[in-house]
Image: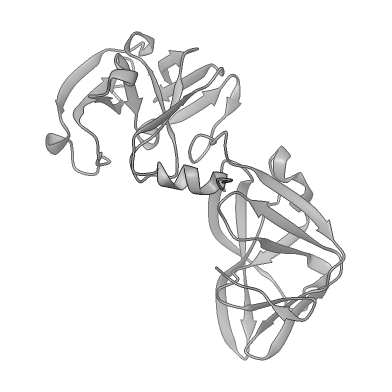
Amino acid sequence: MSIRLGAVLTEQSNKLRHEPTAKRVRAFVGTEVAVDSERAVLVWEPHQAIPTYAVPREDVVVPIIDAKTDEEAPDGAPSHDIHGYRVILRANASGSVGSGYVADDPDLSGFVILDFSSFDHWLEEDDEVDAHPRDPFHRVDVRRTSRNIQVMMNGQLLADTVHGKLLYETTLPTRYYLPREDVFITLTPSPTRTLCPYKGKASYWSFTLDGQAVEDLIWSYEDPLEDAAGLKGYVAFYDDKVEVLLDKKLTDAD
């Protein structure tokens, strides 16, 4: 009997998981290199879909100044659904700290699982890593389509195109991107920004409909990363707040 691969991955999501990476990984606290490793692994903690890095303890190049149980971790530190103890890494020059976790797991013996957000700056080889590490089992595919995409809200047509692009991203619903010239409302730039390690920095847009301001309902990637380069000049709407029709049929926002 054939097994659906996605189901296999989902069934393992309650376990501690890891996968080696061949990339050199560096983490900074302040301006100082705190971690420099060519033996890093990606680690998914139980029930977490986003990985972090783990490195051999000897690849932590600043002193580990403190060790405590997870229950004694500082306020705001991520919680861990695994047995082990927390470590604090200090960069001497700056006084800044990063944190990590040593798992009580034989396959990760000698590794420190790093809290990504506690470090100030990350590199894979010489390229920036933003938001979180990339999952090697996660894909982003942008495809042109001549199918008719329409966006409706409160009975009004906001956009209509046959020159759209479809974004297929692992485990996520299809997103519908439209050229700006096929959007009929006036877009006002928003200061809101978010980061995606696969697509880049997202800019947000607001508009007015029936005299009411609609904030941050639309986003775009002004300078997308390589995998999402085809999205430049296109915008997408939050599907759960508008109606998106594909060839006159309502799409599923889920």
Quarter occupied by the C terminus: bottom right
Above-or-below relation of 232 to 101: below
Residue 131 appears in the picture as rendered: yes
Above-or-below relation of 184 to 46: below
Location of residue 144 (image quadrant): bottom right
Q: Residue at x 60, y 47 (%)?
A: 201
Asked whether 42 or 57 is in front, the reply is: 42
Q: Which residue is drawn at 48% across and 19% down?
A: 26
Asked whether 149 or 62 is in front, the reply is: 149
Measured as percent of width and height from the top left, residue 218 is found at 63, 67
Residue 91 appears in the picture as rendered: no
Q: Which residue is drawn at 13% across and 38% down?
A: 71
Does 59 sit left or right of 154 as displayed? left
Asked whether 46 or 130 is in front, the reply is: 46
Q: Residue at x 75, y 50 (%)?
A: 142
Asked whether 217 or 50 is in front, the reply is: 50
Measured as percent of width and height from the top left, residue 27 is found at 44, 23
Measured as percent of width and height from the top left, residue 233 is found at 78, 56
